[in-house]
Amino acid sequence: MELTARSPSCFSSNYVLQLNGRALGEFKGRWFSESLDIRLTDQRRWTLHREGWVSGRFSLLNETDEVFGTGRHKSWLSSRWLLELSVGECQMVSAGLFNTGYVLEQHGRQLATVRSVNWCEGGWAVQADDPGLDAADLVLVGLIYHVIVQRRRSSGAAAAS
């Protein structure tokens, strides 16, 4: 199973989600916030909600605030993220020193990989290696990766100025 997020152009903050090549929905960011609003094709709405102003904890919620999963930065000095998914607690770890992708692991077993698909548009793809992961799990993994990439861009822009 593969989930992709692609932007129609390099200057757009909207992303189209596709699950195995079929439209799943779209998401867009908010100004001055890392929270994201997701609109699915079947009229459901989800939110990747950042808990608190300086918190590194995120929750994927539906309209009734049902939690599909959570993610949090492991520590200030670590690039690891701890995720609570339908299959239990997992962690996202960097795929390597010169690789911008991440690997989703559980008990030393690789469940999925996430990587950038186009530098200009900021798109990404999550490839599930484990059939136990559902669409909400892949969405959460991808959106956490989106947050990681946005944070890298922001810190790079701040360093350049």
Image (tube, helix red, strand yellow):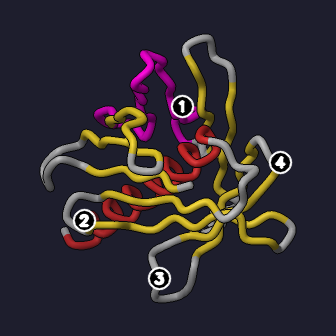
Q: Which quarter of the rendered picture does the N terminus lie within?
A: bottom right
Query: Circle 4 is placed at which residue position?
Result: 88
1 and 4 marks in contact (CB < 8 Å): no
Query: Circle 3 is placed at which residue position?
Result: 99
Task: Name the N-terminal-most of marks 3 and 2.
Answer: 3
Mark 4 neighbour density, 10 Å: few (under 14) some (14–19) many (20 or more): few
Task: Name the N-terminal-most of marks 3 and 4.
Answer: 4
Query: Circle 2 is placed at which residue position?
Result: 157
Q: Which segment is the magenta one?
A: 29-54
Query: Circle 1 is placed at which residue position?
Result: 49
Dominant SS of magenta comes to strand
Residue at 42 percent across and 35 percent down: it is 24
The CA distance from mark 2 to mark 4 is 36 Å
Of the residues shown, which amino acid type is indicated by label 2?
Answer: Ala
Select label 2 or label 4 by which is in front.
4
Residue at 44 percent across and 19 percent down: it is 42
Of the residues shown, which amino acid type is indicated by label 1?
Answer: His
Q: Give how far across and how far down residue 6 sits, in percent.
A: 29, 51
Q: Residue furthest right?
A: 107
3 and 2 marks in contact (CB < 8 Å): no
Task: Name the N-terminal-most of marks 2 and 1.
Answer: 1
SS for callout 1 = strand
Mark 3 neighbour density, 10 Å: few (under 14) some (14–19) many (20 or more): few
Task: Name the N-terminal-most of marks 3 and 1.
Answer: 1
Task: Name the N-terminal-most of marks 1 and 4.
Answer: 1
